[in-house]
Image: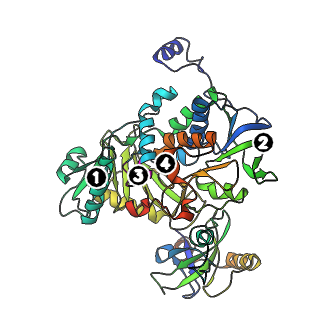
Amino acid sequence: MLLIHCPYCEEDRSELEFRWGGEAHIARPENIAAISDEEFTEFFFLRNNEKGLTYERWRHIHGCGRFFNAARDTVSDKFLLTYKADLPKQPIAAVEEALAAAQDKVVETWEQTEGDAR
Amino acid sequence: MRKYSVFAIAREAMRAHKGWEQQWTSPEPRSSYDVIIVGAGGHGLGAAYYLAKEHGITNIAVIEKGWLGGGNTGRNTTIIRSNYLYEESMDIYEHSLKLWEGLSQDLNYNVMYSPRGVMMLSHNTHDMQSFKRHINANRLYGIDNEWLTPEQAKAFVPVLDIAKTARYPINGAALQRRGGTARHDAVAWGYARAASDRGVHIIQNCEVTGIRRGPNGEVQGVETSKGFIGAKKIGVSAAGHSSVVMEMAGVRVPLHSNPLQALVSEPLKPIFPCVVMSNTVHAYISQSDKGELVIGAGTDQYNSYSQTGGLQIITHTLDAICELFPIFRRVKMMRQWGGITDNTPDRSPIQGVTPVPGLFVNCGWGTGGFKATPGSANLFAHLIAKGEPHKLAAGLNLDRFRTGRLIDEAAAAAVAH
């Protein structure tokens, strides 16, 4: 199970509280009735499905209820960065910086707080 | 290739089993082939076999990143059925089921196809209406499927709890008696042996890293970890990695790759006579010939290539199994694993031509590709040989996401399959 940081609640919570929301930063065409079938296919069905770094939306459905964006590695499933929904796509450098910072941070797992460490 | 038979066993018994041949060869790749198939799972190896057997094309390489049958072919829960709702689905899955019935003889390899029956439990009025609609559609199309009362279901599977007070009460079930299971590894090995015998090269531990294209956009071959290999026709049958391989040719496909988990219990004496699926509480279970209970769980909600999956997914399934079959509550689970499934928006597969000349795709089988192995392989071979789809697979084209002619099994089943 994933441990996900909600950028609105500013807490690490279990995946059970969240709903995956598909690829991030896809803008609905403003002239949706006028676009061609190919453009509609692109907007509606085609997704990157990357092996590696992916940008995706999540919703804290059993928490604050808000959508936010995340950068995640689909091979290790590790979250590199989560950020608020109104922010633009974060450049890879920012993602790597956040990852480096996260490595120093103590995650509140059972082992850290209740188990052997304590 | 020496045929397997009772006489072969007797002959080998007399000389200490020293005369068995290797089942397939592992040649170094040639510089070019007529056809390259990417992915040596059941679908890819089967397509090579049918190309050689039915279309006279034997200069074929099947290129595999890992080992033969080590992806979803070796990770699924081996369920076979054809009781789908839409004609496009019924066509291909029934074609497949008919091939399953004669596959062991065709390949001279025991794939242990066992038509022990697939029962789908109904828990509420919606289930009942939906299953009866499936049964009527199937029977009108010549596919067996029948409705059972809870008592009849219990007679078929004595360990089923049909009490009205159960956590998940049962108000009936749909049963396809010709459905069942087969030995998944034997399917890959059987196709590999039969294809290798007809001259097909199976190249394992060779990763495709690129698809080379000519001035007019047509395919010229693949770049691999063993160098460039030329081909005028390439068939991609790469399951969970289909998006990655198709991207090498610049083709985007509407797929999500999700982990799907399965697990097996400690071996038990024979207790479970068929396959039982419950879409509503999401659990499916059968017993292997070794005696293990084989249990399938759901997919994780997010895209991933990790071949693992969340623990909450399998505990959710086991909760349901324990409620439906209280006798299994103290059974220990032995092993758990995950595979990467490639899911389409309508939960129906994609098999057809692509915008790139010479490139054919067979993907999107999602959580239910094993049952389709012979049928899909057979029709994929037709597609590659003729350059256009067989009429049974015509509706599965990639273009349906532009035309809107979706085959919405996602809405029909309301669950992974």
Q: Chain of mark 4?
A: B
- Can residue B365 be seen by looking at this rendering? no
Sequence-earlier tag: 1 or 4: 4
Residue range highlighted in magenta: B83-90
Say which residue appears at 23% left-offset and 51% top-offset: B147
Figure quadrant of the C terminus of chain B: bottom left
| Residue tagged 3 | B87
- The residue mark sitting in front, 3 or 2, is 3
Q: CA distance from mark 2 to mark 4?
A: 32 Å
Does residue B6 show up magenta in the picture? no
Say which residue appears at 51% left-offset and 16% top-offset: B8
- Rendering coords of residue A95 (x, y %): 71, 77
Q: CA distance from mark 3 to mark 1?
A: 12 Å
- Rendering coords of residue B387 (x, y %): 63, 44
Residue B136 marker:
1
| Residue tagged 4 | B76
Q: Are marks 2 and 1 on the same chain?
A: yes
